[in-house]
Amino acid sequence: MTIWLGIVGWILALVFGIGWWHAHRCHRRMRALFEAEQRWFSSLLDRLGIAYWCRNLDTQALWWSDGFRRMHGVAPEEPVGRERALRHVVPEDRTRVNMVLETAYVQGSGETSYRIQQPDGRVTHHVLRIAVSREPASGQRIAYGVSLDITDRVELENALRERTAYLEAIVAHLPMGLSVFDCDLKLRVWNAEFGRILELPSELLTEGRDFDELIRLPAQRGEYGDVDVEEAVAQRRAMALRFEPHRLERTRPNGRTHLVIGEPILHNGQVVGFVSTYTDITEQKQEHERLARAIDVLRTLLDNIPVGITMIDAQLRLQVWNERLLHVLDLPRELLERPGVTLPDILRYNIERGEYGPTDDVDATLAAMRERALRFEPHDFERTRPNGRVLHVRGQPLATGGYVTIYEDVTQQRTTQAEIEQQARTDALTGLLNRHALPAVLTQIIATAQREGRPVAVLFIDLDRFKAINDSLGHEVGDAVLVESARRLRTRLRNSDVVARIGGDEFVVVLTGITDAADAAHVATQLVEDLSQRIAAATGHHDAAPPLHVSPSIGIAVFPKDATRPSELLRLADIAMYHAKGEGGSGWRFYTPAMNEQVLHRIRLETRLRDAIAHDQLVLYYQPIHALTEDLPLIGFEALVRWPQPDGEILPPAAFMPVAEQSAELIEALGRWVCKTVARQRQRWRALHPGWPPLTIAINLSAKQFDRAGLAERIRRAFVDAEGATEPSALPLLGIEFEITESVMMRDPISAEEELERLREMGAHIAIDDFGTGYSSLAYIKHLPIDRIKIDRAFVHDLAHDTDDAAIVCAAVEMGHRLGRSVVAEGVETAEQLQRLHAIGCDAVQGFALARPMPAHQVPSYVQRVSRGDHLQPWLFGPFASVGTSAAA
């Protein structure tokens, strides 16, 4: 039993051993097959670029494929381990990869992306997918991981995103509206300009919006006319579904014009959509219309402009010409209308007809002209055609090549210019040479005389008393005197001598061919004689002017003795002329250096006078004026300007007034100073002596002050500024009397009357000073606003002994009274003169017999003497005692 049991045991052991061996053998065979299949599968995945790994989550065993090692930079001999796999992963991705791995081990799956920093510096992109399952044989949990290199896909996606961003930016910033509809007419792409141009609300512009919804809004606004809205929508949908290219302009109700361009989108020959652009061309349309109008105007201008015009391109082809060109250049129309005509064609025509003069070689001449034309240089010249016509040719190059040329017929202008130049050299009134032409002629004469070693005499001539004739008898008579004087000069002189009128009544004679100064003196004597003959001045009026008498004052300067330059000779002759005039006129004088010294003295005096006015270095003296009645009451003063000198001398007006009156600006400044000084002095006297009787202060006005308009206003402003009145006075000049000479009335009586009236309106009185010494017209005295006549001292001086003076004074007093003017006699120095003036009926007097001019600080004491009657003491026992009787009582 035991043996059988042993045998059975061995048999069972043998069976089990054989079974184990067989099972082990099968297992080994299966494992070898699995490993071979695994190697084949790993090789296949490697070839497909897929890296993978396995991890036994129960035993923590880890396996990497060769592809995984290469992808993650792990060498074949390196042992496996997570840290080695992650060491080349970009640091920012490592934590996320670890978290995904741990989560996937728990949840059974997971996925993430990560980047690897390659040894060459490149960064590659990868995706990791993880799946966990149990192995059927062992039941163990196995995690499988697959890593894919998605670098190309990521770069493509990035490129697509970048390109999409570019396209979106382009679409958004297009200067026109853009829309893209798919084949079902659903909106897919658009920009903001699309909505703005078509005035579509933003909420309506969404992807997938149907064409009908977008078109319905403008249809409701009536943009497609007065039609049913749905009908309009259906019509436009039907047109859109044809997907036909189109280009049209549409003007919307708001007046804006849009250019709409549509094109179908094709893919593989099939329509997949439609793209349209909407451009606001309102400004372009307006500009086009303006350009069309401008072109029309330009064409009209070209056809009517009085010059010929051509435009040549860079190949010398004639592009533009006008009708005037045919007339100016005498070109045949068929030549210019010939297709492709060029500038050389026109030049050849002109050369062959001799337009540019005779030539033996037409082709050579044409080649030279063509070469010059191809330089495209600006040109400006005049050319006289064979028919005598003068052309002004101006050419201007164009930026694109070629040039525009203008051909102007200036024949008439050149003829007129020659006449004008002759007139510019000639005095229009006398026909003599004028002041502008004289310097050039004189320069030429001097140059010739210098070469020949001969003298030249320059005679500067001024007509005495001409101004009085011109002012009193009118410019027509004055012009007749000038014409006759010019005729006499021309008649007396030789043809080789030069005669010029340089202005007003001034003439210049240049004597050539003389041997010495005596010849000039001889001619000057003859000219004085000829010009002093009376002149019968014929005028166009029925009342002919009486025979007139003028005489010349002549100054002579000789080249080269006195000067060598023309301007200097004229200046020195002018100085000599003024000396001749200062000696009474009607004569001649040679220039001497002493004359020039006198002129320099006058200039220095003028400069000092300007400084004196500017620094308030002048003073006013006041000469009393008394009424010629009992008690000889004081009625006012005449303000007389004086100029104290550093050496103590006090210059009277006669020493500097002639200098002041030669400058309008200087006499104006002097007059303003006098007015301001009188205003301030009068204000001080009123403040210090309120009990004084009303006294008039007389101020002398120069005739020169009337030459500038607005004299009355300037005087008013001077008084107002000096007195510093806070409130304007209606009569700011009340108590002021302005004395004018008779020459004021003769210069411009109408203007003088207006200024005098304005002065009287401001409270002033007007007096005529030095009456009887000028050339006054009684008619002017009658009509001018004059309150008083002042008889000149020349008639008062011999009043007691000269019957003529007595008659003149009597006539003046009687005339003044008949005209309602009071009369004042100046220069009264004796009791006898005072007695006679009283007997004649003169109203007032002033002079040394009563009081000399006195400075302002002496006036108050003199006023007190008058108020006490002390001024009558010299007359109580004299021949005029009767005047002072009441005072003595």
Image (cartoon, rainbow, N blue to C red):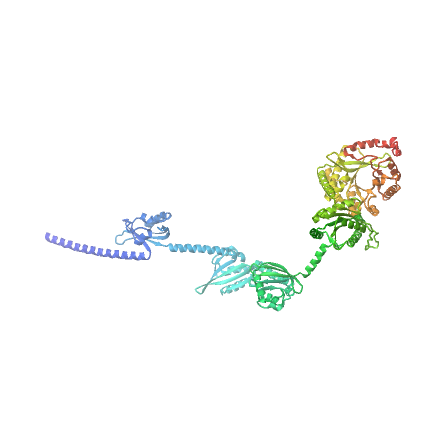
Q: In which quarter of the image is the C terminus?
A: top right
Where residue 340 appears, as percent x and y from the top left, is: 57, 67
- The residue closer to the viewer here, 41 or 376, is 376
In this rendering, position of residue 5 left or right of residue 34: left
In this rendering, position of residue 528 left or right of residue 128: right
Where residue 88 appears, as percent x and y from the top left, is: 34, 49
Residue 31 visible somewhere in the drawing: yes
- The residue closer to the viewer here, 281 or 588, is 588
In this rendering, position of residue 562 left or right of residue 845: left
- The image quarter containing residue 396 is bottom right
> Residue at (59%, 65%) from the top-left corner?
365
- The residue closer to the viewer here, 1 or 578, is 578
Q: Is residue 460 above or below residue 624?
A: below
- The image quarter containing residue 883 is top right
Q: In this view, does 863 lie above or below 254?
A: above
Where residue 159 appears, as percent x and y from the top left, is: 42, 55
Where residue 785 appears, as percent x and y from the top left, is: 81, 44
